[in-house]
Image (spheres, helix red, strand yellow):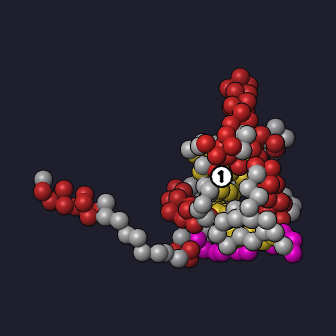
Amino acid sequence: MGEQRDSFKKSRGRDFKPTVWSEFFSQKEVIVLDEKTSFCVYKSKPPEKEGPIILLLHGGGYSGLTWAQFSIEITSMIHCQCLSVDLRGHGETITEDDLDLSADTLSSDVGRLIEKMFPENCPRIHLVGHSMGGAIAVHIAHRLGKHDKRLGIIALDKCRFCNDLACGEDMVHLLNGWLHRGSPPFAI
C-alpha cells in the first residue's frame, strides 16, 4: 500500500520546466494574411488516413501551445491533424491592433486564416475552443454553421468572457436549434 502511495505522489509531481513547441508539433508556420497581420500556427503531422482538421483555439492570456498535450493525445487516438493558433494579441501572432479582442474581430481572423490555409477544397474542420477560444468557436459556428456542412464545434468551459462577447445568447440559440432539429450532420 505504501508503494502505491509513493508512486502516486511521484506521478502527480509538477514539472515547471519550459518545453519547446517541437516536442509536441511537427511544424510551426507563420501565416501572413497581409502586410500587418501574421498568425503563428502549430501543426501536428497530417494523418496517415483521411481525417478532419481540428482547429484549436486557446483561452485568453494563453497561446496555441496550450493545446500541445491534447494534440499529441487526440492524434494518437484518431486520424486527424491538429492546427493550434496563436490568436490576436497572444503568442507570436502579430496584428495592427492586438487589443481588439472583439468577437467579430477574432472570428473574422479565424475565418480569414482558414481561407488562407485552404483556398480551395477546404476540408472538414472541427473548431475546438477553451474559454475565450470556445466563445470564438461558438461565434463562428453561429455565423457559418447553417451554411457550412464541413464545420463542427466543441466549446469547453464557457466562461464570463463568452458573455462579454455577447455569444452566450448565440450559444443558447444554436444549441436549442440543434435540440429541436436534431444534431447537425457536421457535429462530432
Query: Left or right: 26 with respect to 171?
Result: left
Q: Residue at x 74, y 61 (%)?
A: 99
Query: Left or right: 97 with respect to 54?
Result: right
Q: Position of residue 164 (x, y in %)?
A: 69, 43
- Please identify the residue farthest to the front as the structure is shown: 99
Verify whether residue 32 appears in magenta: yes
Image label count: 1
Q: Is residue 123 visible?
A: no
- Dominant SS in magenta: strand
Q: Position of residue 104 (x, y in %)?
A: 80, 50
Query: Left or right: 80 with respect to 15?
Result: right
Q: Amino acid at mark 1?
A: Gly
Q: Is residue 142 above or below residue 115?
A: above
Q: Position of residue 81 (x, y in %)?
A: 64, 61
Q: Residue at x 68, y 51 (%)?
A: 127
Towards the viewer: 6 or 133 = 133
Quadrant showing the C terminus: top right
Q: Position of residue 176 (x, y in %)?
A: 69, 27
- Please identify the residue farthest to the left as the structure is shown: 2
Towards the viewer: 123 or 55 = 55
Q: Is residue 80 above or below residue 41?
A: above
Q: Is residue 8 above or below residue 140?
A: below
Towards the viewer: 75 or 115 = 115
Q: Which residue is mark 1?
A: 133
At label 1, counting other C-alpha atoms closer than 10 Å, the crowd grade (few under 14, some 14-19, many 20 or more) is many
Q: Secondary structure at mark 1?
A: helix
Magenta region: 25-35
Query: Left or right: 125 with respect to 20?
Result: right
Q: Residue at x 80, y 54 (%)?
A: 105
Q: Residue at x 67, y 40 (%)?
A: 163
Q: Is residue 116 visible?
A: yes
